[in-house]
Image (cartoon, rainbow, N blue to C red):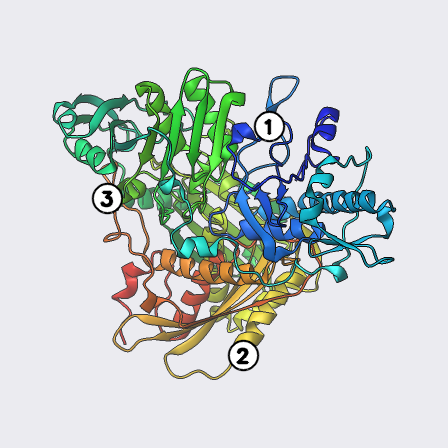
Amino acid sequence: MAFDMNRRDLFRYTAALGGLVVVGPALKMARAAEVDKEGSLTPMVQVAPDGEIRIYCPSPEMGQGVLTAIPMMFAEEMDADFTRVSAVTMPLWLKKTDDGTMTWRVVPQFSGGSTSIPRSWVGTRELGAMTRALFLEAAAGRWRVSADGLTAKASVVTNPDTGETLTYGELAGDAARVMLPEGFKPRLKPRADWSVIGTAQKHLGNDEIVTGRAVYGIDADYPGAKTVVIARSPYLDGMVTSVDDSAARKVPGVVDVVVMPRPDTGKFYTYLAAGVAVIADTFWAAKKGRDALRIEWDKGPHTTESTESFDAQCEALLDGGQGQVVREDGDVAAAKANARVITRRYRQPFVSHCQLEVQNCVAHVTPEAVTIIGPLQNPSGASRIANTISGVDREAISVDVTRLGGGFGRRLSNDHVAEAVYVSKASGLPVKVIWTREDDLSHDFYRPAGHHELTAGFDDHGNMVSWQHSVASASKYYRRDDTPPEEMWTAEIYPDDFPAGIVPNVRHEYFSATSGMPRGSWRAPAHVANAFAVQSFLDEAAAELGQDPLAMRLKLLGDARELPYANHGGPVFDTGRMAGVLKRAAKMANWGKAMPAGHAQGIAGHFTFGGYCAQVAEVEKLSGGGFKVHRVYCAVDVGTVINPEGVIKQAEGGINDGISTAFWQEVRVTGGEVQTQNFDTYPMLRMADAPAEVLVEIIDSEKDPSGMGEMAIPVIAPAILSALARAGGPRIRHLPVYSEINSLTA
């Protein structure tokens, strides 16, 4: 977390480096435009006279628990009574530099890549320690003593010499006037003194969620806002050739109709598809108006694309020879020449984010200002895209972030914001764009599909001497303005992933497949695809060589050491920590224990974005066909744990999400048109199919924390499918699993 405060800001907000004010008035949620008023609102914390504390979290909350974990870090160093803490998401707060570029006023505001916790780890605690210093100085002023001899705990400052106490609420007004010296460096508490970090806490705001009081984007109100439903081109990169909106305009409540042109297909998306927006007083009127539109479409350049043609393209690329080599260690060809060679291929489909809350956004564009309210993972990106479409200076663009009903990378893209801004500007009205479930599944930034070929060579003693991983996929970077064609692989292959750096001869190569399907980030993006292929392949190789799957992995990892890791989650990959979670999961599951006929265990482990996770799945092959996952044991090492309760819940959720995705989900295309449009063709995990037990253990660590939002997902599919094969079922290499379930007969 970086801070950018000038001398004026230092005095204005009374705390060095942090931009921090502690204020006494009653707590309230302020709009972004109000944040910058002198003394009106702190960017991080408010303390009311009654002692209630509100902490403003810079990372949007989408179920990953940052609205609890980041305030926990702040409250720890503030020595706040956490039972009096509430939290809200900070409105976007930017400032313009001397050269005219925009930067963070105080802290980065973003949720993605499991970075919220590690990015906040140092800076948030420093801000909390500065807050504590303000209260100590305020109390010292009241008692006319040195602050050095005072203590703070649970929102109370104590003078040990006299026994006198003052609460933070009583001191709030004085603390707001304290000036810390220039260059002040906060003292962070030693780990042994922590009383909040590392304790299990229920998520702040849970009571609002379960009682229906939580405000998601789809709940947001704005004065005078009309509802917008958009008919988007059903064809990939299609466009509107003509529209008859006469019947739509006759629907009671319809206010206006706006045609949205196709975005420039040679550049990164603003919004996803050409379409026709119906503006109405209510959602139902807007939807009925959309149903009444008569639109002729230019079907665009991808009318021959289908799921089958894309799969055939990937297979042909892998069959066709060498791709773009992105890592080459040693001499793979020479090593294979004298080795026992094993080769397998695996397939990953396009999948949708399919958040519970569909896309939505409020926007109001005037010549002087823009207001945006919605569920956003990247609020700064929303500001940029609003500036591009409206032409309004970014300093006059207000962005408020609501709670997200799921994100998973989908709301890193701001196409829903772009649509709302475009329609508001065109109509002159404040609007609220709402998607339907069919819109959501038909117009997503899908997880890239691809095929993986893995080849390994083994010597006479069963030691791996060569490793080759070839990927043919449609890169998610294909429409990024700043990514040249030769770098498309960087989103699809992480060249430092296991077993790179361990096996002496390694080659990673990439084949770029073409597709009109929009692609984007999806939970643990390439790790999900790569872990499925790599971990499944290791199990197949172990079976063919007669080796135990756990023993093979531990032998490859070898002695504990840190290997260079240049990808996200680095700078190192620790083989000892990876071995540690594998051993812990195996111990939890009593790996190798006798199992009834038709039952078996499977194991897998992976390093994702700085965190280590291993799982053992216990699976039964059913006599009537199909199979049942009875139990999953999960061990995680994500460094210092802020909220153990949050880590466990993220592991449980990731396991179930991973099962749901791998078993049933695939977005299919025919004639350049997405066919998968609702839950009848895109099934989600049902309770009956979830594991009866998910047992999670956290390995204690004093390493800096990693996130936990994405760590459990990549591991579950290979663990389950390896167990199925060991139980006598087929080896499934093509996802989703549902396409092969009918073949699972006794």
Circle on res. 360: none
Residue 37, image x and y in percent?
Answer: 60, 27
**Mark nearer the N terminus (1 vs 3):** 1
For the point 86% across and 49% down, the residue is: 148
Q: Secondary structure at mark 2?
A: loop
Q: Nearer the viewer, residue 745 or 391?
A: 391
Left or right of 346 on screen, residue 742: left
Residue 271 place in picture, x, y as percent? 37, 29
- The nearer-to-camera label among 1 and 3 is 1
Is the residue 239 above or below the residue 644 in the image? above
Q: Is residue 160 left or right of residue 592?
A: right
Indicate the position of residue 84 as horizontal and vertical percent values.
Answer: 60, 54
Q: Amino acid at mark 2?
A: Asn
Foreground mark, 2 or 1? Answer: 1
Would you name the residue on which mark 3 appears?
675
**What amino acid is labelled 3 in the image?**
Gln
Q: Residue at x 42, y 58 (%)?
A: 658
Secondary structure at badge 3 equals loop
Question: Which is more N-terminal, label 1 or label 2?
Answer: 1
Q: Badge 1 is on which residue?
A: 36
Alpha carbon separation for disc pair 2 and 3: 44 Å
Which residue is outermost to the top? 367
What residue did someone put label 2 on?
A: 590
Q: CA distance from mark 1 to mark 3?
A: 48 Å
